[in-house]
Image: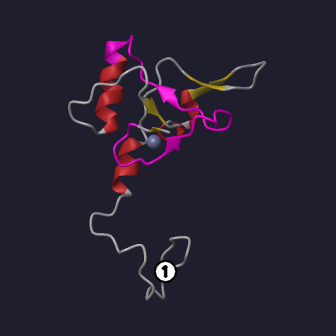
Amino acid sequence: MRYCCVIGCSNAKAKTDCRDKTFFKFPLKDSQLLQLWLKNTGRQGFMPSSCSIICPEHFEENSYTTRQFTKRRLLKQEAVPIIVSKTLKQIPKVGLPPSATDGNNMQPDGTKQ
Ligand SMILES: [Zn+2]
């Protein structure tokens, strides 16, 4: 298993499933772009390696191009993972325990009331 490097994100890529979930490697050769990626992962002093990956959830739809023939989604060269701060805000600082059973106004899918 390899895990998404974005802080607060627990998406992982199993070695066997490479079809539907494409994870993206850091732009190690483009230091300027790399800085933006690093900033957005939320990790301090993090140095990505060629094995470090980010899951597709942090990229907006217009960050992708689709290859005409293979229909594979590719990340644009200048794409930056910008949906990270949103992910961070979703993490409750003081959350209810996941096993709380007395939440009458809490639906099983997490929607409130
Ligand atoms: Zn992620």
Magenta stretch encompasses residue 101: no
Which of the two residues, 30 or 28, is positioned nearer the viewer here?
28
Which residue is at a point 30% across and 22% down the rendered structure image? 35
Instruction: Look at the image and name its color scheme.
Output: secondary structure
Residue with the most extreme right position: 69
Locate residue 18: give its quadrant: top right
Residue type at the position of mark 1: Met
Across and down, in percent, residue 111 comes to 51, 72
Which residue is at a point 51% across and 28% down the rendered structure image? 24
Which of the two residues, 70 or 60, is positioned nearer the viewer here?
70
Across and down, in percent, residue 99 comes to 43, 77
Q: Describe the element under mark 1 as helix, strand or loop.
A: loop
Few, some or many C-alpha atoms within 10 Å of disc 1 (few <14, some 14-19, many ≥20)?
A: few
Magenta residues, start to end: 5-32
Q: Is residue 85 left or right of residue 83?
A: left
Dividing the image into four quarters, tell me where ligand 1 lies: top left
Locate residue 39: give its quadrant: top left
Residue with the most extreme top position: 29
On whether ligand 1 comes within 8 Å of the CB at mark 1, the answer is no
Q: Which residue is mark 1?
A: 106
Which residue is at a point 41% across and 36% down the rendered structure image? 82
Q: Say if 22 sits above or below 77 in the image.
A: below
Q: What's the magenta bit mostly, secondary-structure-wise?
A: loop
Q: Say if 51 sits above or below 44 in the image.
A: above
Across and down, in percent, residue 77 comes to 50, 17
Across and down, in percent, residue 96 comes to 35, 75
Magenta stretch encompasses residue 16: yes
Residue with the most extreme left position: 45
Which residue is at a point 48% across and 80% down the rendered structure image? 106
